[in-house]
Image (cartoon, helix red, strand yellow):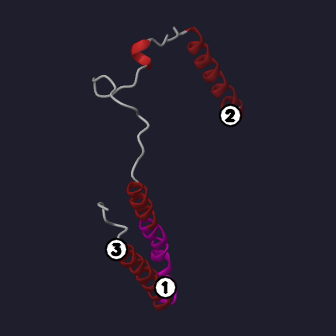
């Protein structure tokens, strides 16, 4: 009996919502709805201006170093195991490698905004 309600009730709700959508008035797009919105001003220039590659590089660097946190989350469970020294050594090596990568990017100028 319960499984019948679990099948019939969602089907009826879906059918009801489809019928409501069918009979609601359609929105007809006009010139104002189709125009790009720029804070109340008329659009000026092209929206297809090229971005500086620096923005993409900084975003990729952020994602790369942000993954450090995701990869270090399981360390909390690893510390509950029998050998704490192995987990601490592994985390330390991981953080040292990431720190060396950050220093390398800093020295190569990957974090500079001006060229």
- Mark closer to the chain start, 1 or 2: 2
Report if residue 79 lies within the magenta region: yes
Secondary structure beneath dot 3 equals helix
Q: Nearer the viewer, residue 104 or 29?
A: 104
Q: Position of residue 1 (x, y in %)?
A: 71, 31
- Mark closer to the chain start, 3 or 1: 1
Q: Position of residue 74 (x, y in %)?
A: 49, 73
Please tell me how many numbered marks the rendered image carries: 3
Mark 3 packing: few (<14 Cα in 10 Å), some, or many (20+)?
few
Which residue: 45% across, 75% down? 76
Provide the residue designation for mark 3: 106
Q: Position of residue 73 (x, y in %)?
A: 46, 70
What span is colored magenta in the figure? 65-84
Q: Position of residue 4 (x, y in %)?
A: 71, 30
In whole angstroms, how far apart are the C-alphas of marks 3 and 1? 24 Å
User: Up-down: is 59 above or below 41?
Assistant: below
Provide the residue designation for mark 2: 2
Which residue: 38% across, 58% down? 54
Which residue: 39% across, 60% down? 58
> Can you tell which quarter of the image residue 37 is in?
top left
Q: Nearer the viewer, mark 3 or mark 1?
A: 3
Provide the residue designation for mark 1: 90
Secondary structure beneath dot 1 equals helix
């Amino acid at each position: 009996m319960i499984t019948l309600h679990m099948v019939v009730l969602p089907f009826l709700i879906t059918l009801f919502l489809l019928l409501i959508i069918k009979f609601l008035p359609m929105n007809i797009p006009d010139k104002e709805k189709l125009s790009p919105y720029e804070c109340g001003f008329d659009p000026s220039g092209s929206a297809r201006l090229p971005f500086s590659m620096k923005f993409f590089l900084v975003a990729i660097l952020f994602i790369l170093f942000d993954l450090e946190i995701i990869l270090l989350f399981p360390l909390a469970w690893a510390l509950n195991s029998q050998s704490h020294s192995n987990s601490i050594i592994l985390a330390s090596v991981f953080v040292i490698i990431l720190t060396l990568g950050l220093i390398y990017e800093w020295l190569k100028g990957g974090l500079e905004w001006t060229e």
